Structure formats: C-alpha cells, structure tokens
Amino acid sequence: MVRDGRADVALVSRPFDDHGLESELLWTEPRVAALPAGHELAARDVLSPDDLADIPAPRWSGARDADQNYWSAHPGRPVDGPIIQDASQLLEVVAFGQAAALVPTSLARSNQRPDVVYLPVRDIAPYQMMLVWPAGSRSLWIARFLDCAIRHSSEQPAEP
C-alpha cells in the first residue's frame, strides 16, 4: 500500500521486499519456539533449529518462500504445516499439535496459555520491526512520524 500511495508509512517486520521503499529499524527482539505443552521438546531449556527440523511449521497464507523460511526453522526446505491467516490461528495449530512455530518474544509474552510452551532457540535471526515509506519521499509529515516512532520505539518492554 505504501508503494501505490494508499499509505504514507507502514510498520513491517523483516523479511520484506524493500523495492521502492526506505526503511528504519525500530526494534529488534529474539524469536522463540512455540510448541504444544505436551511435546517431548517442551521440557528442554533451549532448542536448536535442528531440533525443530522434523516438526511441521505453519504456512502463512500468501507469504513468499523467503517469508515462510524465516518463520520456520527449516530454511531452504518446503514449509509443510497448516495454512494460517493470523497469530491466533498460529497458536491454535501449535496447541493442537499440528505444528511448531518461531514467534517474537513479545507475542509469547502477551499470549501465555497452558497448552503452548515457548522456548529459546539458538542460532536463528531475531525479529525486527521496521518503519517503511516511499523511497525518495521528502514529506515533512513522514519525517515527523519517523522521528516520533524512533523516539518511542526505545520504550519497548524489556525481555523476560
């Protein structure tokens, strides 16, 4: 929507297609694995991507392969789990034992539930929230919004 002029700015997470956009990093946070509470890996303290390799990962509807790979622990392999539309569906397929997912720690903190366990995963890229706007824009309003967003992004809650 930013590219075609329907929006002046947008909040997006990496990875994204940055063609025709400028961006600014607002914050970075670790991702964790969301697993069904009864899963054999749920008792571990820390996981590796290899631990998750044989567990299906949710597929985001309409997502590019690069996006699917980022949200799964199986980069370069087909993502084979249920198709989802949003974070609530993601947590449901995890709770039902149909998939394991990588999620930002902020999502884990705000979605504590007895049927899902969140565990740290070594050696995976962090979650990054970006502000994007049209490349070459000289809008004073966008500059002011960007300044405000950057100042307030430092107020993100600390990691648990």
Image: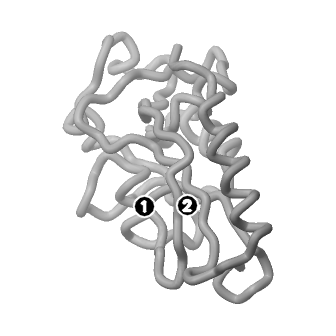
Percent across and percent down for residue 109 are 62, 22
Seen at 79% across and 67% down, the residue is 141
Label 2 close to label 1 by CB (< 8 Å): yes
Percent across and percent down for residue 144 are 75, 58
Looking at numbered disc 1 in the image, what kind of residue is underneath it? Gln
Where does label 2 land, which residue?
60
Query: Which picture quadrant has residue 76?
Result: bottom left
* Quadrant that contains the N terminus: bottom right
Query: Which picture quadrant has residue 8?
Result: bottom right
Seen at 32% across and 11% down, the residue is 45
Q: Is residue 79 left or right of residue 91?
A: left
Looking at numbered disc 2 in the image, what kind of residue is underneath it? Trp
Seen at 59% across and 30% down, the residue is 106
Examine the rendered structure and indicate whether residue 105 appears above or below residue 44.
Answer: below
Examine the rendered structure and indicate whether residue 19 appears above or below residue 39.
Answer: below
Instruction: Count the marks.
Output: 2
Q: CA distance from mark 2 to mark 1?
A: 7 Å
Examine the rendered structure and indicate whether residue 58 appears above or below residue 120.
Answer: below
Which label's residue is closer to the chain start, 2 or 1? 2
Colour basis:
one colour
**Tag 2 secondary structure:** strand
Percent across and percent down for residue 31 are 43, 35
Q: 10 Å neighbourhood of mark 1: few (<14), some, or many (≥20)?
A: many
**Tag 1 secondary structure:** helix
Seen at 26% across and 56% down, the residue is 75
Percent across and percent down for residue 43 are 36, 10
Examine the rendered structure and indicate whether residue 85 appears above or below residue 44.
Answer: below
Q: 10 Å neighbourhood of mark 2: few (<14), some, or many (≥20)?
A: many
Q: Which mark is residue 29?
A: none
Where does label 1 land, which residue?
68
Observer-nearest residue: 144 or 116?
144
